[in-house]
Image (cartoon, rainbow, N blue to C red):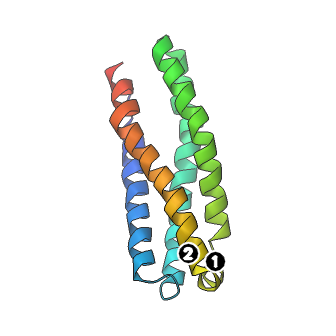
Amino acid sequence: MDIDRFKHQHVDILSGIAALRKLTHQGVEDYAVDIAHELKALSAVVTSHLAIEDRILYPSIRRNGDARMADMAESYQDDMKGIANAFINFARRWSSASTLTKRPEDFRNEANTVLKDVYDRMLRENREFYPAIEAL
């Protein structure tokens, strides 16, 4: 199975997280417009990635006939639901520069948790899940 598209999306997601981290360190209030813009762009990539995984990747792996991979796909999909819901809610809550400006510490605290979870998940997929898929 060719998963290059998924790998490229991971690069985009990790780059978006890095950009948000950099802007946040420079100052949430000073860069609120840029943060909101970057978060919207990241949200679009994450949402697209999740939809493609749910519609194409996971079902394809389940149809493959390898029980171990089917179980792995199911586990990854189930695990991602919580991470995805937290990210989607986070992105909606902080999509406005005015909200960021009013509550910079709340944004920073939530970003540290939510974006770390997404980041860790991308790395885990890159390290464990995608190599297993490619080995099929």
SS of the residue at dot 2?
helix
Residue 5 visible to an observer of this rendering: no
Please name the residue shown 60% across and 73% down the image.
Answer: 106
108 lies above or below 97:
above
Q: Position of residue 8 (x, y in %)?
A: 37, 48
68 lies above or below 98:
above
Badge 1 density bin: few <14, some 14–19, many ≥20, Cα 10 Å: some
Label 2 to label 1, Cα distance in Å?
6 Å
82 lies above or below 133:
below
Please name the residue shown 62% across and 71% down the image.
Answer: 94
Q: Which residue is mark 2?
A: 36
Query: Callout 1, which amino acid?
Result: Ser
SS of the residue at dot 1?
loop
Q: Is residue 104 left or right of residue 10?
A: right
Query: Which residue extends farthest bottom?
Result: 30
Q: How many marks?
A: 2
Please name the residue shown 39% across and 35% down the image.
Answer: 3
Q: Which residue is mark 1?
A: 96
* Rendered image quadrant of residue 131: top left
* Rendered image quadrant of residue 75: top right
Callouts 2 and 1 close, C-beta under 8 Å: yes
Is 104 in front, or is 39?
104
Is 30 in front, or is 48?
30
